[in-house]
């Protein structure tokens, strides 16, 4: 179609999705991409096209892994929800009860659900540090524990691009005795054959697509201390190491690698009362509790009115994943996304390696999702 060699499965009733997918390539907005839809627990669309490398010598195929950046946060939200369901965590409990050092600098009353909904005031580090410190898990957790909030906790949300992963990950590790990366492998990736990773072993690195960075900076709106700490300092993200070290690192806010169908199948379970391949991975009550609104309003870091669940973005205010007001999910830097619509039992995921500057609601994925609903 239009000279684009599209592979995979796309039934005739989703012909508009295939056309929108081809159009993204015709517009020269893609290098390589994949889009998957799950309906009533069944994978109904899974299409891919393009190249996995900048030189266009390696096809983007069904084995290609893509860094999904903040879409990883949807995986972290699910892992925390599972720990809540097992009784090892409670959304309303104080973080300091589990992690005593975290109670420093006026943070003693902060709850797990406030951390999960970006209300704790720890969107980034205002004080200068070596960007390589991000590769030292314990050092970053110690800094977060000692840090004073940038704004009064509970008064507003302020998106945490990187620190969220250490906060959620350390809470989970203390409750579960294992890392989120290990739990993802043990509980989902291996038993359900899902190509999902937080922390990628060297043996898988050859499958990772090259990224083409966006040619413009995102629009962060009115800048403030929370935004600067989150995104705009020289140390706001990991640096000083090679890309392989970044891939290996388990940061449950940023270093996820996945294929679109693996993400779509997992989100498909959340859209289908918790059922994944005939097994119950999370109760409908806990899915609702995870997705329940914790705070709504103009975010201090993202230039959007946000409605946050416990680790997931709620579609009600941003309207980037179709018309469903109960839909929830997460977007990642450059354009990846994963969403679940429990009302229609529909879920989807989009992955790509040519990044855009859109913070939420990449036009490419929005065209695909709109075509799916149409």
Image (tube, helix red, strand yellow):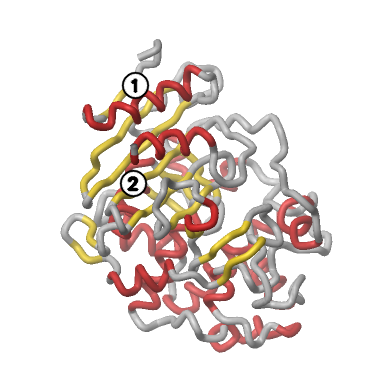
Horizontal relation, residue 346 to residue 58: left or right: left
Depicted 195 relative to depicted 292: above or below:
above
Q: Residue at x 49, y 78 (%)?
A: 174
Classify the position of the C terminus by image quarter.
Answer: top left
Q: CA distance from mark 1 to mark 2?
A: 19 Å
Of all residues shown, which one is farthest toward the right?
Answer: 128
Residue denoted by label 2: 262
Q: Position of residue 150 (x, y in %)?
A: 77, 70
Check residue 343 in the rendering and tell me which mark sits there, or answer none: none
Image vertical order of residue 202 relative to residue 143, above or below:
above
The residue tagged with tag 2: helix, strand or loop? helix
Q: Position of residue 247 (x, y in %)?
A: 54, 46
Which labelled disc corresponds to residue 6? 1
Answer left or right for 29 relative to 101. Answer: left
Residue, x 75% and y 72% (percent of image)?
151
Q: Would residue 57 appear left or right of 164 to someone viewing this image?
A: left
Q: Nearer the viewer, mark 1 or mark 2?
A: 1
Which corner quadrant of the image does residue 178 belong to? bottom left
């Amino acid at each position: 179609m239009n000279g684009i060699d599209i592979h995979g499965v796309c039934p005739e009733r989703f012909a508009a999705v295939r056309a929108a997918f081809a159009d993204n390539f015709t517009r020269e907005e893609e290098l390589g991409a994949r889009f998957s839809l799950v309906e009533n627990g069944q994978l109904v669309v899974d299409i891919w096209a393009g190249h996995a490398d900048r030189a266009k010598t390696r096809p983007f195929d069904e084995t290609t892994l893509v860094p999904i950046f903040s879409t990883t946060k949807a995986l972290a939200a699910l892992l925390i929800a599972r720990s809540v369901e097992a009784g090892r965590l409670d959304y309303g409990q104080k973080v300091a009860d589990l992690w005593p050092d975290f109670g420093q600098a006026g943070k003693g009353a902060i709850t797990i659900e406030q951390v999960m909904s970006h209300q704790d005031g720890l969107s980034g580090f205002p004080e200068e540090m070596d960007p390589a410190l991000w590769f030292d898990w314990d050092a970053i957790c110690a800094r977060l524990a000692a840090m004073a909030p940038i704004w009064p906790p509970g008064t507003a949300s302020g998106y945490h691009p990187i620190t969220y992963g250490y906060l959620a990950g350390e809470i989970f590790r203390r409750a579960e005795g294992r890392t989120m990366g290990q739990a993802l492998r043990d509980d989902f990736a291996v038993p359900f054959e899902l190509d999902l990773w937080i922390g990628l072993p060297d043996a898988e690195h050859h499958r990772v697509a090259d990224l083409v960075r966006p040619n413009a900076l995102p629009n962060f709106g009115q800048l403030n201390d929370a935004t600067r700490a989150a995104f705009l300092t020289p140390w706001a993200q990991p640096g000083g190491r090679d890309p392989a070290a970044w891939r290996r690192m388990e940061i449950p806010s940023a270093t996820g690698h996945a294929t679109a169908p693996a993400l779509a199948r997992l989100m498909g379970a959340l859209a289908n009362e918790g059922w994944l391949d005939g097994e119950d991975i999370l109760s409908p009550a806990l899915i609702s509790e995870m997705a329940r609104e914790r705070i709504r309003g103009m975010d201090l870091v993202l230039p959007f009115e946000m409605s946050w669940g416990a680790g997931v973005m709620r579609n009600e205010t941003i309207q980037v994943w179709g018309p469903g007001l109960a839909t929830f999910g997460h977007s990642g830097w450059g354009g990846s996304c994963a969403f679940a619509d429990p009302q229609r039992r529909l879920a989807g995921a989009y992955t790509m390696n040519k990044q855009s500057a859109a913070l939420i609601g990449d036009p490419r994925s929005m065209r695909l999702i709109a075509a799916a609903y149409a």
